[in-house]
Image (cartoon, grey):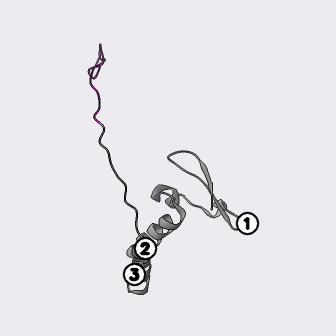
């Protein structure tokens, strides 16, 4: 039936590697903002705008994509994030 009689990974441990995250510098974000002044295809403009919005708000792409008019209440963007379910007010 495809059922396992025992856990095949029992006794194995996952190795963890130390990682470091880099973030964009403000000078790099300003360079991206300047791209708005050059002719871009509409899809490129949309991607650039979504990325910059993400940089300034900290929202993930999936959360930005889900934003609707009803999420804007009295000048405040209220979104429940997909990954954590936390309500974010911007």
- The mark total stands at 3
Res 27 → quadrant: bottom left
Residue occupying image coordinates x 28% and y 34%:
15
What kind of element bears circle 3?
helix
What kind of element bears circle 1?
loop
Q: Earlier in the sequence, mark 3 or mark 2?
A: 2
Disc sitting over residue 35 in the figure: 3
Q: Which residue is mark 1?
A: 74
Q: Earlier in the sequence, mark 1 or mark 3?
A: 3
Labels 1 and 3 touching (C-beta < 8 A): no
Q: CA distance from mark 3 to mark 2?
A: 10 Å
Q: Residues within 10 Å of mark 1 (few under 14, many from 20)?
A: few
Q: Residues within 10 Å of mark 3 (few under 14, many from 20)?
A: few
Residue occupying image coordinates x 51% and y 56%:
63
The quadrant of the image that shows the C terminus is bottom right
Q: Which residue is mark 2?
A: 29
Disc sitting over residue 61 in the figure: none
Name the one closer to the observer, 23 or 36: 23
Kindly report which numbered mark, 2 or 1, lies closer to the viewer in this rendering. Answer: 2
**Is residue 29 within the magenta segment?**
no
The magenta segment is 1-15
């Amino acid at each position: 039936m495809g059922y396992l009689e025992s856990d095949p990974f029992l006794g194995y441990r996952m190795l963890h590697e130390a990682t470091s995250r880099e973030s964009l510098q403000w000078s790099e974000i300003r360079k991206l903002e300047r791209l708005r002044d050059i002719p871009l295809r509409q899809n490129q403009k949309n991607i650039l705008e979504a990325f910059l919005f993400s940089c300034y708000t900290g929202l993930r792409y999936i959360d930005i994509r889900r934003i609707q008019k009803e999420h804007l209440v009295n000048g405040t963007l209220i979104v429940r994030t997909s990954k954590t379910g936390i309500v974010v007010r911007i």
